[in-house]
Image: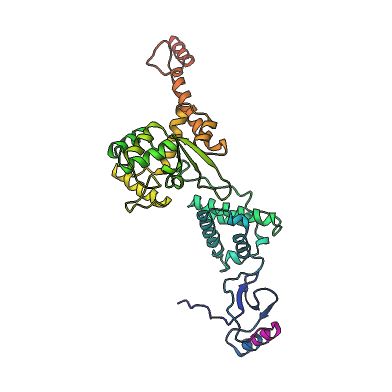
Amino acid sequence: MTTEPMKLPPYVTRTRSRHGKLCLYVRRRTGRWIRLKASPGTPEFISEYLAALKELGLPPDGEPREVDTPLSGTLRDLCQEYYRSPEFKRLSKSTRHVRQLILERLCKRTDQKGIETGDKGAGYIERRHVRMWRDEMSDRPEAANGMVKALRQVFKWAVDTERTEDNPARDVPYLSSNNPDGFHTWSVEEIQQFQERHPVGTKARLALDLFLYTGVRRSDAVRLGPQMERGNELHFTEAKGRSLKVKARVVPILPPLRQSIEATPSGHLSYLVTEFGKPFTSNGLGNWFRKRCNEAGLPHCSAHGLRKAGATIAAENGATEHQLMAIYGWESPKQAALYTRKADRKRLAGASMHLLMTDQNENSCVAPHIQGATRAEKKK
């Protein structure tokens, strides 16, 4: 049976030393700390506590203390400072939320001695520690990689602001993903299957055409609307990373998309709205579109997979890396190269497979030099 820790009086903070020993201190929000050595609840503890209050000039009844204030110099303390930094505040709301969840979960991790990771000195964390924490999550490689990435950013900021001398997460490699290809990429046949179930004029078809013929993410699809049209073009700024860098996009409205827009009037500032006439949230649109995929017999398909399908189709039709970058708003050719390489391999294989055939016998796939050797062996 577990018991909750004894409630401490005002100004008393419970922390662990670097050696894992539980210690109690009387402290202001800033300034001196006075160690209490007696056990809580004993007369000796009360005497020490009152003497510490007097020495610090604090009233006996005190004021509410910051219960969650971490010990200075610990990983938890470093994370709390990072949350207040301009670098963290410039991140999008969703990114801040996810990163803070990752770091808080790491700080609450306990070792064999029962010491929380957040109570360890940030300056004592080494590369081997980060690697050990990563390996503990090897059954969830994406979560492990997210933890490494979050620590890299915290310690990068700490090094830049001279709070620490080294970034122990910088050289810790990511784990290989269990799903290296990520979201399923729609095939042409799957797109046609969805179109048959959701014809032009339905909201589901308009959503498909927006994703497929603009290449936008969900966070942008929920914002697209008639007010962004300039002639036969859509003018908008990307939602992703907007707090760090504004990326203006101009996308031509292709004929299939124009047909779908005109056949599905919404009467709102956004093309896609809920049944209550309000714009979707990004997650709400993703969940709604997944249901439309289920209706079409495509439970493995998603909105993001259409973005990948469009990039695949464009690459196979001959789009260059820089053309893909322009279509999808990528800043680096790294992402575009994934699609052009796959398309190049497919084209080269298609153009080269006939080399496996021989002139003497079109039904044979044995290379000529091997066939020659075989005939020579028969003559012997």
Q: Nearer the viewer, residue 30 or 170?
A: 30
**Quarter of the rendering occupied by the C terminus:** top left
Q: Nearer the viewer, residue 295 or 13?
A: 295
| Residue range corresponding to the magenta coloring | 49-59
Vertical side of 284 occupied by 10: above or below: below
Residue 287 x, y percent position in the rendering = 37, 50
**Quadrant of the image occupied by residue 134:** bottom right
Give the residue drawn at x 49%, y 77%.
4
> How would you classify the magenta stretch by its main secondary structure?
helix
Q: How many marks?
A: 0
Q: Nearer the viewer, residue 165 or 186?
A: 186
**Quarter of the rendering occupied by the N terminus:** bottom left
Residue 372 x, y percent position in the rendering = 47, 12
Residue 191 x, y percent position in the rendering = 35, 36
Residue 183 visible in rendering: no
**Quadrant of the image occupied by residue 254:** top left
